[in-house]
Image (tube, rainbow, N blue to C red):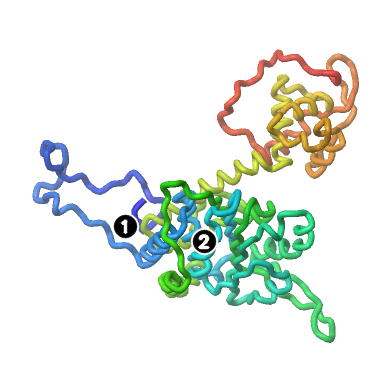
C-alpha cells in the first residue's frame, strides 16, 4: 500500500485495473502495445489525490510513525475513525474504538496519544462517573470521549458492578436518540441528557462484550525486535498532529449534509454495518484508494471478531460443541443429556472443566441454554428406554442464527449408519 495512488471517483473499485502497458527497455517492442505516436514518457500520469485522500494519507503516516500497528487494516480503521469524529453530527451511530492488548507495553496508550491529538473536541479520562460523562456530552457538538485504562473499570466483578452505569451509558451512546433520564433541580423534574458521542477505550484484555460488539476493535501486540517507531514527545510532536486535526475539520465540516444523505454499499450487515458505516462514508468522501481500503478493513476485521466470538463466546462455544456432539454420532433425532455432557467435558480445550470437579453439570447446561429457550425433557430412545435428553430439532434455529456452519466443512461428514446412543451411552 502506498501513499500515492490513482484517484478512484466511485466504488466499487476494480483492483485488477492497471494503467495501459508501456514499452520496457530490454524487451521486444511487441511486448507492449502503446499508441504508435507515444513513447514511455507519454504514459498517463496518476491522477492527483483529492484533498481528503491526501489528509488521510498524512494521518496514516503519522499513526505508523509512532505506533507499531498490528496490520494495515488496523491503520486504515483508526485513520477513518479519527476522521469520523469530525462529522459526528452527521451519523446515526457513533462507533466505539476498542484498543485492546493481551498485556502491557503493546502500544495501546501510545496509539491513544495519537488519537487524542487528532480527534474532534477530545474529552480524555482514566476514570469518570456516569454523571460526569453524560453531563459533558452536548447533543449538538458532543466531545469525543477517550478512556485509558478502561480494563480497570470492568476487569473484576466488583469493578464491573460499580461501573455498570458507565457501561450502559457507553452502550446507549452508540445510537442517536438514546438519552438518559435524571431527576434534577429543586422541583425534582425529569431531565433528558444526551448520550450520543464517539468514544475510544483502551485497556488490557477484552472490554465487556456489549461494548466490543459496538466497536471497531484494534488488537495491539508487543513490538517485535525489528519493528522501530519514533519516540513521542508531547511538546515536540503534538503540533503536527494538531495540524492534521485542523485539516480534517476544515475538509469535513462543509460535507455535513452530503454525509447525512449517503447510504454506501457495505460488505457487512446488521450492527457491524451500523458501526462501520461512518468510516466507509468518510472513505467514499475522500476517494482515491480509500473506498476499497475501508471495505477491505471492514470485512477483514469484522470477520476476525466474529471468529473470536465463535471460539471464545461461552454460549456460542456451547452451541458449537453440542452440534459436534450430535454430528459425532450421526445426527440422531435425540441425544441423552448424559452422553451430551460426556462429549462436552471430553473437550480439554473447552472451559467446561471450570464448572466443577466433574465439569459441566446438567444444571449448568440448563442455565446456559435457558436464554435460547432450550431445555431438556424426558425422551424416548431407539432402544425403548426413556431418559432426560435433547431433540436435535430444538437447536436447528439457534444454530442457524448464532453459529451457522461454514459453507465448506473441514471435517468429513459422519456416516449415516453410526449407532444411535441411548441414555447410558
- In the image, residue 162 sits, relative to residue 24, either above or below, namely below
Q: Residue at x 75, y 14 (%)?
A: 419
Q: Give how far across and how far down residue 390 sits, in percent.
A: 82, 29
Q: Residue furthest left?
A: 37
Outermost residue toward the bottom? 186
Residue at screen point 56% across, 48% down: 302
Q: Residues within 10 Å of mark 2 (few under 14, many from 20)?
A: some
Label whose residue precedes the other's in the sequence (1 or 2): 1
Dot 1, how many residues are within 10 Å of its Cα: few (below 14), some (14-19), or many (20+)? some
Q: Nearer the viewer, mark 1 or mark 2?
A: 2
**Image quadrant where one finds the C terminus:** top right
Q: Does any portion of residue 274 appear in the rendered image?
A: no
Q: Pointer 2: what residue?
A: 110
Label 1, label 2: how far apart the Cα atoms are: 26 Å
Quarter-wise, where is residue 149 in the image? bottom right
State the residue position of label 1: 4
Residue 308 is situated, as x and y percent measured from the top left of the image, at 61, 43
The location of residue 41, given as percent across then percent down, is: 14, 53
User: Does 362 appear above or below 169?
Assistant: above
Element type where label 2 sits in the image: helix
Instruction: Return the x and y of residue 176 as percentages of the image width and height.
Output: 64, 67
Query: Residue 92 vs residue 373: left or right?
Result: left
Instruction: Describe the element under mark 1 as helix, strand or loop.
Output: loop
Residue 405 appears in the picture as rendered: yes
Determine the residue located farthest toward the front in the rendered image.
225
Amino acid at each position: 500500500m502506498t501513499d500515492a495512488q490513482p484517484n478512484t471517483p466511485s466504488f466499487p473499485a476494480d483492483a485488477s485495473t492497471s494503467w495501459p502497458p508501456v514499452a520496457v527497455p530490454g524487451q521486444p517492442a511487441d511486448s507492449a502495445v502503446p499508441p504508435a505516436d507515444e513513447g514511455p514518457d507519454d504514459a498517463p500520469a496518476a491522477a492527483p489525490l483529492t484533498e481528503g485522500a491526501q489528509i488521510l494519507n498524512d494521518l496514516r503516516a503519522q499513526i505508523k510513525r509512532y505506533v507499531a500497528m498490528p496490520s494495515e487494516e488496523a491503520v486504515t480503521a483508526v485513520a477513518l475513525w479519527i476522521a469520523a469524529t469530525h462529522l459526528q453530527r452527521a451519523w446515526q451511530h457513533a462507533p466505539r474504538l476498542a484498543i485492546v492488548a493481551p498485556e502491557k507495553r503493546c502500544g495501546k496508550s501510545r496509539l491513544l496519544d495519537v488519537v487524542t491529538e487528532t480527534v474532534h473536541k477530545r474529552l480524555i479520562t482514566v476514570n469518570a462517573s456516569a454523571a460526569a460523562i453524560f453531563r459533558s456530552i452536548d447533543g449538538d457538538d458532543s466531545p469525543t470521549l477517550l478512556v485509558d485504562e478502561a480494563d480497570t473499570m470492568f476487569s473484576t466483578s466488583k469493578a464491573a458492578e460499580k461501573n455498570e452505569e458507565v457501561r450502559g451509558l457507553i452502550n446507549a451512546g452508540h445510537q442517536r436518540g438514546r438519552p438518559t433520564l435524571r431527576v434534577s433541580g429543586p422541583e425534582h423534574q425529569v431531565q433528558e441528557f444526551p448520550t450520543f458521542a464517539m468514544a475510544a477505550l483502551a485497556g488490557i484484555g477484552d472490554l465487556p462484550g456489549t461494548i466490543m460488539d459496538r466497536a471497531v476493535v484494534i488488537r495491539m501486540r508487543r513490538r517485535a525486535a525489528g519493528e522501530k517507531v519514533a519516540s513521542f514527545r508531547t511538546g515536540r510532536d503534538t503540533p503536527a498532529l494538531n495540524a492534521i486535526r485542523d485539516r480534517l475539520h476544515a475538509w469535513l465540516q462543509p460535507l455535513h449534509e452530503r454525509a447525512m444523505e449517503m447510504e454506501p454499499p457495505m460488505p457487512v450487515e446488521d450492527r457491524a454495518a451500523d458501526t462501520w458505516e461512518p468510516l466507509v462514508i468518510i472513505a467514499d468522501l475522500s476517494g482515491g484508494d480509500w473506498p476499497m481500503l475501508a471495505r477491505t478493513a471492514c470485512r477483514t476485521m469484522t470477520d476476525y471478531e466474529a471468529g473470536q466470538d465463535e471460539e471464545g463466546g461461552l454460549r456460542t462455544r456451547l452451541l458449537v460443541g453440542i452440534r459436534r456432539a450430535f454430528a459425532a454420532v450421526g445426527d440422531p433425532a435425540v441425544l441423552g443429556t448424559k452422553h451430551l455432557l460426556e462429549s462436552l467435558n471430553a473437550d480439554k480445550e473447552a472451559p467446561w472443566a471450570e464448572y466443577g470437579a466433574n465439569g459441566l453439570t446438567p444444571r449448568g447446561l440448563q442455565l446456559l441454554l435457558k436464554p435460547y429457550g432450550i431445555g431438556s425433557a424426558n425422551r424416548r430412545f431407539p432402544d425403548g428406554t426413556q431418559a432426560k435428553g435433547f431433540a436435535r430439532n430444538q437447536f436447528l434455529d439457534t444454530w442457524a442464527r448464532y453459529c451457522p456452519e461454514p459453507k465448506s466443512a473441514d471435517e468429513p461428514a459422519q456416516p449415516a449408519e453410526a449407532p444411535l446412543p441411548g441414555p447410558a451411552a
